[in-house]
Amino acid sequence: MHLLQRLHRIHQHIPGPWLVAGILVICFFLFSLRQKDDPSDHEYDPSGFPQIFMKGVQTREFDATGKLNFELTTPEVAFYQPSIEGPSPSDYTLIKAPEMVFYNNQDGTPWHMSAADGRSETNNELIRLLGDVVIQQNSPSQGLIRVTTDELQVRTREQFAETDKAVKMRSAKGQIDALGMDADLAQSRLQLKSQVKAVYDPR
């Protein structure tokens, strides 16, 4: 009864519509505070946290005959699954300082790759190397061949790599700068795409 009497006295001094509006504002304010304090209303965002995290990882891939085809070594791997529904095409893996070795080329000399970071997609069939990418081979016939670039996409099963970024290739014969490259590692064949500039060492 005391509450009704107070409301009646307030109603005598404040017009009805303003009183209703004030009560609604107070109710909305209290409801907002309750929502902020209730942790159950916050949805989990899986995109910011890895589903799987591993350290000191080494993986090997073999061909149909059982011969070693590809090897990957990395100090740190994190697998992300952005969709809360489960596995999806948007899944990806971040690879820290990857070091890769490709075997089964024609002269038997492996190709080595390294980068600051890597990102794997499409069920690990495509690996994108990012930052300080180095590709090199030291064969008995050609000597040391070293290629550097900023980004490289690698299809591991096909032993094929490509980039549209600037490329610098050094060998015993000199240096070649170009824009873009296709690399068939199985055949030890490098094809520079455009803007090729070569400086040969006559020694």
Image (spheres, rainbow, N blue to C red):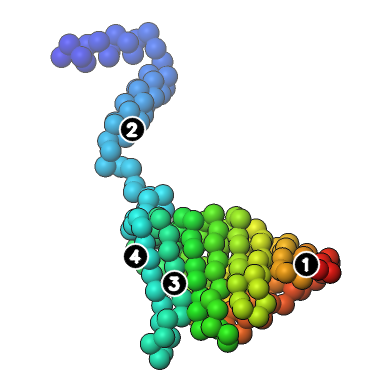
Q: CA distance from mark 4 to mark 2?
A: 28 Å
Name the kind of residue labelled 4 in the image.
Gly
Q: Which mark is residue 174?
A: 1
Q: CA distance from mark 1 to mark 3?
A: 30 Å
Q: Which mark is residue 53?
A: none
Badge 3 vs badge 4, beta-carbon distance below 8 Å: no
Which badge, 1 or 2, is on the more N-terminal residue? Answer: 2
> Which of label 3 and label 4 is nearer to you?
3
For the N terminus, give its image quadrant: top left
Horizontal side of 176 relative to 160 (left or right) equals right
Q: Secondary structure at mark 1?
A: strand
Q: Secondary structure at mark 2?
A: helix
| Res. 78 visible in picture | no
Structural crowding at the residue carrying mark 4, measured as other residues with C-alpha within 10 Å and reported as few (<14), some (14–19) or many (≥20): few
* Residue bearing mark 4: 86
Which badge, 4 or 1, is on the more N-terminal residue? Answer: 4
* Residue bearing mark 3: 71
Name the kind of residue labelled 1 in the image.
Gly
Q: Residue furthest left?
A: 1
Q: Position of residue 84 (x, y in %)?
A: 35, 59
Badge 4 vs badge 1, beta-carbon distance below 8 Å: no
Q: Position of residue 34 (x, y in %)?
A: 29, 31
> Which of label 3 and label 2 is nearer to you?
3
> Which of label 4 and label 1 is nearer to you?
1
